[in-house]
Image (cartoon, rainbow, N blue to C red):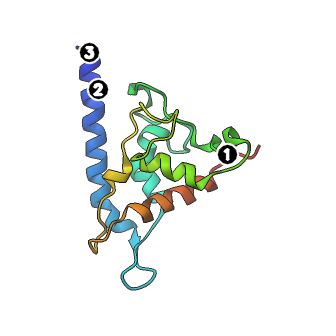
Amino acid sequence: MKKFATRLVVSIGLMALVAAATARSGAAQGASQPGAQSYSGAMLFDDYCKICHGAQGKGNGPLATQLRRPPADLTLLARKNGGVFSPDMVARIIDGRKPLAGHAGGDMPVWGEAFGKSADGADATPAKIAALVSFLGTIQQKP
């Protein structure tokens, strides 16, 4: 029963986080050209990722101990991939709708379904994932 209650609290917390971050995402948007949305990867990370991955992306966020699997240290993505940061692989993991072998079964939300629409009604998912991938590329530890 305790495990169920913990999972319920984590699930509710993640849903609240998504709702709050989605409401705030209007502040992260800025039109770089008419009809286009741009997003701050750092702000999106703050809104959606740091609760589990930690402020520095090291996998030590406030909810990390409540998850079935510890969150990844996002600063080591390149190091764990032979020194190469793979934007395509990282984008696919964040999106979550087409899981990669070995990257499923955790508590990470399927952000490809969660990101939804931008302020102008367009699908914001690709732009938000691209902004997050770009940000994650900047926090990689040197080999």
- Mark 2 element type: helix
Residue at position x 62%, y 55% in the image: 137
> In the rendered image, which residue does mark 1 sit on?
78
Q: Quadrant of the C terminus?
A: top right
Looking at the image, which residue sits at the far bottom?
Answer: 34
- Mark 1 element type: loop
- Residue 14 in the image, given as x and y percentages of width and height: 31, 40
Q: CA distance from mark 1 to mark 2?
A: 31 Å
Residue at position x 49%, y 36% in the image: 103
The image quarter in which residue 74 lies: top right
Q: CA distance from mark 2 to mark 3?
A: 9 Å
Amino acid at dot 3:
Lys
Specify which label sits upstream in the sequence, 1 or 2: 2
Tell me the number on the disc at residue 2. Answer: 3
Circles 3 and 1 in contact, beta carbons < 8 Å: no
The image quarter in which residue 8 lies: top left
Q: Residues within 10 Å of mark 2 (few under 14, many from 20)?
A: some
- Residue 72 in the image, given as x and y percentages of width and height: 54, 36
Residue 107's place in the image compared with 1, above or below, is below
- Residue 97 in the image, given as x and y percentages of width and height: 39, 47
Q: Residues within 10 Å of mark 3 (few under 14, many from 20)?
A: few
Specify which label sits upstream in the sequence, 2 or 3: 3
Q: How many marks?
A: 3
Q: Is residue 40 left or right of residue 111?
A: right
Residue 112's place in the image compared with 127, above or below, is above
Specify which label sits upstream in the sequence, 3 or 1: 3
Q: Is residue 22 left or right of residue 60?
A: left
Residue at position x 50%, y 62% in the image: 131
Circles 1 and 2 in contact, beta carbons < 8 Å: no
Amino acid at dot 2:
Arg
Amino acid at dot 1:
Ala
> In the rendered image, which residue does mark 2 sit on?
7
